[in-house]
Image (spheres, rainbow, N blue to C red):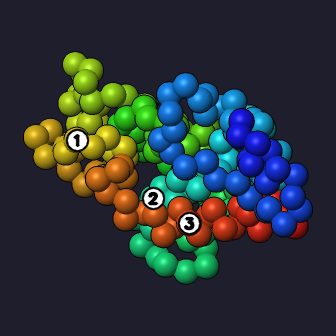
Amino acid sequence: MPKTLKKKLKKKEVTGIIIEKPIPAQLMTDSLYNYIPKEKEIEGLRLKALVLPPQGLAILTMIKYFLTGKINDKIIIDPKKDVNFWKKTLKNKKIVLLGRDEIYAKPITKVFQEFKINHLNIDLNIKSTEEYLQQADIIINTSDKSLENYSLKPNSFIIHYSSLNTSLEPLVVYYLFKNMVGVNK
């Protein structure tokens, strides 16, 4: 770890660290996150993190909007209060998460696991991809590939969040700041 980062981690005025990805392959992302003190790791990707990954919270915010059709103060995800909402609302929904990347899919999976949201995480290159997509109520596409050539279930909704579509970034930034404030209370 560079000496400058070690010095920054020790400073009280440094209230949050973000690791900009992708990073060189020789650096292990999990090791880097676990090196950062819990109270300064605001991306929620460290083992036993104090916060949840903002990418996953942004996805849940979009799902909550699609399911309720409302934008109000309850649209913001509250990990302590929303557990029952997700249990009831997604009970019979089939969710497919396309992609297994570190930047988009991994943080979403971590949030889904925290909320105990059942989902299937697949790669677009498997033979049965179309079969899974035809059954899905909610599709989260973190790959850079289009789904226009696939037959999808009527009335399903798709959230495309990848390097080609970063429209959720304002929500991600919101949750990053929320995490930073939360760990520094």
Residue 21 screen position, x and y as percent:
51, 45
Q: In the rendered image, is residue 45 in sight?
A: yes
Mark 2 or mark 3, earlier in chain? 2
Q: Nearer the viewer, residue 29 or 58?
A: 29
Image quadrant of residue 27? top right
Residue placed at 53% from the left, 53% from the top?
A: 55
Q: Quadrant of the N terminus?
A: top right
CA separation in Å, label 1 and label 2: 21 Å
State which quarter of the image contains the C terminus.
Answer: bottom right
Helix, strand or loop status at disc 3: helix
Left-right relation of 161 to 20? left
**Relative to residue 181, is residue 5 depicted above or below?**
above
Looking at the picture, how far across and down is residue 70, in whole percent? 47, 76
Asked if labels 3 and 2 touch by Cβ distance under 8 angstroms, the answer is no
Instruction: Check disc 3: other Cα within 10 Å, few if <14, some if 14-19, many if 20+.
Output: some
Position of 132 relative to 78 (above/below): above
Q: Which residue is disc 3 drawn over?
A: 173
Read off the residue under disc 1. 145
Does dot 2 land on a helix, a strand or a loop? helix
Q: Residue at x 33, y 28 (%)?
A: 123
Q: Residue at x 25, y 54 (%)?
A: 155
Sequence-wise first label, 3 or 1: 1
Q: Which residue is mark 2?
A: 63
Q: Amino acid at mark 2?
A: Ile
**What's the residue at 50%, 28% (across, down)?**
25
Q: Earlier in the sequence, mark 1 or mark 2?
A: 2
User: How far apart are labels 3 and 1 at the CA level?
Assistant: 24 Å
